[in-house]
Amino acid sequence: MSTDLDITGGKISRNLITMAVPASVGFLFNTLYNVVDTYWGGRISTDALAALSLSFPVFLILLATGMGISSGTSALIANALGAGETDRAERYQAQGLSLAIFVAVVLIGPILLSLGPIFRFMGAAPGLMDTALSYSRVLVAGSIFFILNAVFNAGLTARGDTRSYRNFLIFGFVVNVGLDPLFMLGFGIGSVQIVPAMGVAGIAGATILIQAFGSVYLALRMLRAGGMGSRPRISMTWPRLDYWREIASQGIPSALNMATIALGGFVITYFVARFGTNAVAAYGSALRIEQIALIPTIGLNIALATMVGQNNGAGRLDRVRESYVTSLKMGLVVMVGILTPVLIFASRLIGLFTDNQEVISIGLRYLYIQALTFYSYVVMNQANSVLQGLKKPAMIMWVGLYRQVAAPFPLFWAMTTLTGLGVDGVWWGLVIVNWSAALFTLYWARRMLARAEAAVAPRESAPLTNATPADHHGATPALTARAATPGGQSASFPCVAANGCIDAE
C-alpha cells in the first residue's frame, strides 16, 4: 500500500484531510488544465471557445463509462480491503480493467459516427459545427486513455492513495501549457514544418498524448501498490462474467448518473443556445470558474467514499456515520471560504477567456445566481459517496435523471419563456432543480445508512461462531466480516448475504 492511513481505525478527520487534500490539489490542476484549453480556444475565435463547450457533453458520455466502472470497482475494492480479503480486491482491479477496455472499444466507434447529428440537434451553426467536429473527433478517438486512467486510479483511491493521481494531474497541467500552443500553432525550422498547425484539434491532440502517458504512470503505481498482487498475472484480466456483473451492478448507476450529466449538458446547452453563441461561450467560461470553487469539496467526496467503503467492509458503521457528518461540516466550511474570493474576482476570471463584454456580463450573472446552489452540489455528491461505499448506488441514477432531464425541460422552458428572464431563467432553474435533488439525496443516504446500522446491530449482540472463509463467488459458504465491539476491537461473525454483511434493499 502507498499510504500509512489506518482507514478503519485511525482518526476520521485526519484521514479525510490526508486523502482529500492531495485529491483536491490534483483536481485544481485538472481544472487549470481545462482553463488553459479554454484560454487557447478563446484566442482562436469565439466559435472555438463555443466548440469546447459544445463538445463537453458528448465526451462526458465516454467519460461516464470510465467513471462508472471506476466507482463500482473502487467501492468493491474498498469493501474487500476493509474485510481483509486482499485477493478478492486484486481480482476486482484486474476485472475492472478488462471490463473498461471492452466497453470502450464497443462505444467509441458509434459515438464518432454520431457527432454530426448530435451537434445539429444542439443547434450548432455551420461554422461552429466544423470547429466542434475538428476538436471532438480527436478527443473521442483517444478517450480510451481517460477510461483506463479512471480504473487504474480506482484501486489506488480505494487504498487511500490520492497522491499518485494528483502527481499525474500536476504533470499534465505543466506539460499542457507548452503542448497546447505547440500543437495548435505548429512548429517549424525554416521551411521544414516539424509539427503541423492543427488549430483547435491540436488542443485535443495535446490532451490525448498526456492521457496516454498517464495510463503508463498510473498502471505502474497500481502494480506497485499491489493492485494485482505481488506477482501480477495477465490471466487475472481474462473476462469473468461473475466479476463483471458485480462491478456493473455497482458501476452502472454511477455511469448512468454521469451520462445524465451529459444529457443535462445537452439540455442546458439547448436552452442557452436559443440566446446565441455569446450565451453558449459565457456558459462554458463561467462553468470553468464554478469548477474552481467546487474543487476542494471534490477531494472530500473521494476521501469520504474510501472511508465509507473500507469501514462498511469492516462492519464499522459507527465510523461510516461519523465520517459522513464530519465531511458535510468540512464541506460547508470549505465552500464558504472558497466561494467568497471566486465571486469577488469573477469578472476578472471570466475576462481571462474573452474580452467580449456581452459574454462576460452573461457569465457573471450565471456565477452570482449559482452561488445560491453551490452547497447543494456538496450535499448531493457526499450522499452519493455514502451510497456508493455502502454498495447501494441505485438511487444515484434516478436522482440524476430527475436533476438532469425530467425536471429541467419543463422548468427551463417555463423560466425562460413565461417569466421573461431570458437566459437567466436557465440559471434560476438550476437553483430550484439542484436544491430539490440535494435534499432528497440527503434524506435517502441517511435512510440507507440507518438500514445498514440496523442490520449490523443484531449481529454485534449475537453469539460469535466460527466461520470458514470462502471464495466470495462460491455458492453457499458463509462470508466472514468484522463488527466493532464496545472496546473498539473487531470480532468475526458469519454473514451469508450475497453482497456482504449489509442486507440488500
Image (cartoon, grey):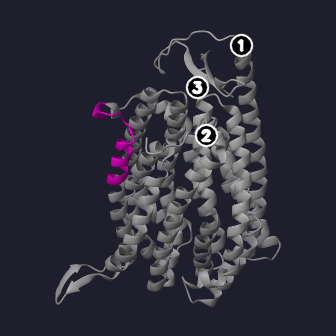
Q: Is residue 220 magenta?
A: yes
Q: Position of residue 381 (x, y in %)?
A: 66, 51
Identify whether 103 is placed above or below 428. Answer: above
Question: What residue sits 42% from the left and 75% below the top?
Answer: 130
Residue located 61% across and 70% down the image = 287
Q: In this view of the protein, which residue sits in the foreground, 266 or 444?
A: 444
Q: Which mark is residue 207?
A: none
Mark 2 → mark 3, Cα distance in angstroms: 26 Å
Q: Could you tell which of marks 2 and 1 lies nearer the N-terminus?
A: 2
| Type of amino acid under label 1 | Ala
* Earlier residue among tags 3 and 1: 1
For residue 43, side relative to residue 295 (left or right):
left
Give amino acid for label 2.
Gly
The residue closer to the viewer here, 51 or 457, is: 457
- Residue 401, how many percent across, how many down? 66, 50
**In the foreground, 430 or 304:** 304
Q: Earlier in the sequence, mark 2 or mark 3?
A: 2
Q: Secondary structure at mark 1?
A: loop
The residue under label 2 is 10
- Quarter where residue 197 is shown: bottom left
Quarter of the image where the N terminus is located: top left
Tag 3 residue: 499
The residue that mark 1 highlights is: 462
Classed neighbour count for the residue bearing mark 1: other residues with Cα under 10 Å, few (<14), some (14–19), many (≥20): few
| CA separation in Å, label 2 and label 1 | 26 Å
Read off the magenta span.
Answer: 216-235
Disc 2 and disc 1 in contact, CB within 8 angstroms = no
* Residue 442 in view: yes
Could you say whether the residue bearing mark 2 is in a helix, strand or loop?
A: loop
Answer with left or right where residue 95 lies relative to residue 476. Answer: left
Q: Nearer the viewer, mark 2 or mark 3?
A: 2
Which quadrant is home to the C terminus? top right
